[in-house]
Amino acid sequence: MLTISNLHASVEGKPILQGVNLEIHAGEVHVLMGPNGSGKSTLSNVLVGNPKYDVTAGTVTFRGKDLLSLSPEDRAREGIFMSFQQPIEIPGVSMTNFLKAAINAQRAYRGQEPMKAAEIIKLLREKRQAVGLDAHFMSRGVNEGFSGGERKRNEIFQMAVLEPLFAILDETDSGLDVDALRVVAEGFNKLRTKDTAALVITHYQRMLDYLKPDFVHVLFNGRIVRSGTAELGYEIEDKGFDFIKAEES
Amino acid sequence: MNAALQQYIDLYEAHQAILCHAAPQVLNEARAKALQELKAHGLPTSRQERYKYTDVAALLEPDYGLNLQRLAGKQQVAACAVPGLKALTRYVAGDVMLPTSSQVPSTCEGIEVMSLHEAQQVYPDLLQQHYNRLASEQPDALTALNTLLVQDGLFIYVKRNASPALPLQIVNTAQTNTPAMHNRRLLILCEAHASATILLCDHCTTRSQTLTTEVSEISLGEGAQLSIYSVEETNSQCSRYHNIYATQQAESRLNLCDVTLRAGTSRTMANVSLKGEGAQTFMAGAIVASEAQHIDNNLLIAHHAPACQSEMLYKSVLNQESTAAFAGKVYVAPGAQQTISQQTSANLCVSPNAHAYTQPMLEIYADDVKCNHGATVGKLDESALFYMRQRGISEAEARLLLQHAFVSEVISHIDIPALRDRLTSLIDMRFRGDDDVHCAGCGLCGK
Ligand SMILES: Nc1ncnc2c1ncn2[C@@H]1O[C@H](COP(=O)(O)OP(=O)(O)OP(=O)(O)O)[C@@H](O)[C@H]1O
Ligand SMILES: [Mg+2]
């Protein structure tokens, strides 16, 4: 589904990714771990085409297409979703209008008719209830006045609404209380099918428990330095990153 | 004497007899002083504080014709329906009020709308007492020009304790195939404990240049509540000057909300005077401009009594080479303790060639006051744009949503839901770049 080869990227002239290679197949969930500042969010942002990040070398293909040549919106319409590590506020653009625009833009790309207003309302209600977001959030601006945890729930809610083929969850578990984490993880698990895949960035074992990932990778200094099964994740939780750092330097 | 002004004075002097013949007496009585003032002071230049941002002389330069004979002609008026809004509607073609056969329903008892002509017959004393009183307190060239040339206007009278169930809608339509000047006048009396809502709609159905001067004088009695929503959807060939004078007695509340969408030039000057304790004023503006549009708001709220509150909230979204100027002043007189005032001017310059000038000013002679002001000029938020694009929304649509969101804060203060919805869709159409020949949705063009 997604193939990343020798990916190099920089932010404001500073090289961050230094040759990332990763292959993700449909049906798989990959967890990406790594110390703070190792480049996890950079990788996520590069995959979704954030213009702040510059790709300096390498290729990414998504379902046979050259991902890096697509605009951010077309990547989203191809089915890539990112749950932001720090979802920003968009005051004045109501959640309902925002999602209506997103749903219909994605449908238009696939040659589908716009969804009727009543259907959208119904869809939003259904998904909202699944992640435990109150109705009043829908009339507020996107993330406007949402708490940290509510913003994370909102990311998963949007994912549930848009039903992406490939989801990137950048520390969606951080800042969630235990109940919210369960709701979010269960919400995510419900969206897993044999046709979808995900890259989940986390620092915590609890997420591994819930998600039972197929693979765990460790990013360090802009490179994937270890790959393994969930066991690798538990080992890191146990020992920290120091043993990897020591071996790498 | 400036040549631009001279042509209006010549016109007046040449046609004084016809002009006055078709006008009510009270209006005629005010002309001599206006003429004197214009001759003495001429037109303001940009060196004058309150005219810093708009070159009046240049805008008065073209040779506009006046409808001196008061011919209503075969004017088409914009239907200007606000879906879901029931209103008492009156039509003005150019600057001529059209006769109406529709009666004021019994639920709207206590509100009267008539031409100044009729008011001269029905309420001569009120007219004598209030016409050109507030407007002449401080000389202003555009007010003087209006006073010199105006031939009729509207008198809106909301009687003591009256609370009409429907808003009053005044639909102004300019329709002319030659450059035309319209001089409009509004006199609004809202007596003690009365409450009313007025919607002023400005349309233009033709592409000839128009120049509109408008002077509104508004008096609010004790405890009176008045909301005036003004929606401009003319076109780039229209220049408009609106001078507003308001005075408020104790515990009264005035909401003035101005939506400016398409005029080539629009300058609003407001002088609001809070005379009684506990009076409140809320003034807001939503501005969407593009191309060479020039929108200027020059506002003064004077707190003369204690415990009054005032707020100015002006937001503009500027595309291409458009300009918006905000100069808002709050004056707090000695003794006007416990004044609370807030001024906000926020501008979004979407294009690097757009200009926003913002100048909040405070002049305070009392010590127990809370006066805040904030002014911002910014660009579209790149991370918000990216967030939306990540969800599949095109960059163009994302930009549009952000621009719309920026001005929607102003619209959210309008307390008539149907009007809010209508404005939301008008603003949306404005951003989507629908042609500006027709007012959006007036029905004239069959859209
Ligand atoms: N916009 C930016 N401007 C400058 N430096 C940046 C920017 N974004 C990221 N960086 C730098 O790039 C490096 C990698 O950051 P990144 O956000 O990818 O780390 P991360 O692995 O996601 O860390 P964390 O676990 O703390 O979220 C860091 O040193 C960071 O300071
Ligand atoms: Mg990160």
Image: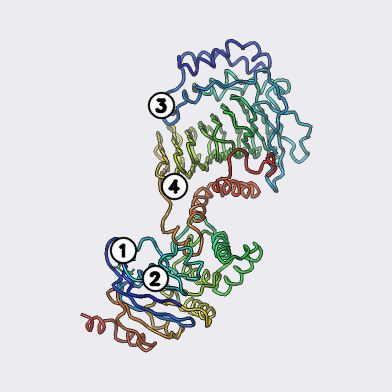
Report x, y in % for residue A123.
61, 69
Residue A228 in view here: yes
Instruction: Chain letter for mark 1, please.
Output: A
Task: Check disc 4 and report its element: helix, strand or loop.
Answer: loop
> Depth-wise, is mark 3 or mark 1 nearer the camera?
1
Labels 3, 1: one chain: no
Q: Which residue is mark 4?
A: B350
In three-dimensional space, the C-alpha distance between marks 3 and 1, rounded to whole angstroms, equals: 47 Å
Q: Mark 1 belongs to which amino acid?
A: Val
Colour approach in the figure: rainbow
Q: Is residue B22 above or below residue A63?
A: above
Chain ID of residue with mark 3: B
Q: Ligand 2: does it lie within 8 Å of the C-beta at label 2?
A: yes
Q: Which chain does the residue under circle 2 lie in?
A: A
Local packing at callout 1 (Cα closer than 10 Å; few below 14, some 14-19, many 20+) is some
Residue placed under numbered mark 2 in the picture: A44
The residue beneath circle 1 is A11
Query: Around disc 3, counting alpha carbons within 10 Å, would you say few (fewer than 14), some (14 to 19), or many (20 or more)?
Result: some
Nearer to the camera, B236 or B89 = B236
The one nearer the camera, B340 or A13, is A13
Q: Classify B217 as above or below B232.
A: above
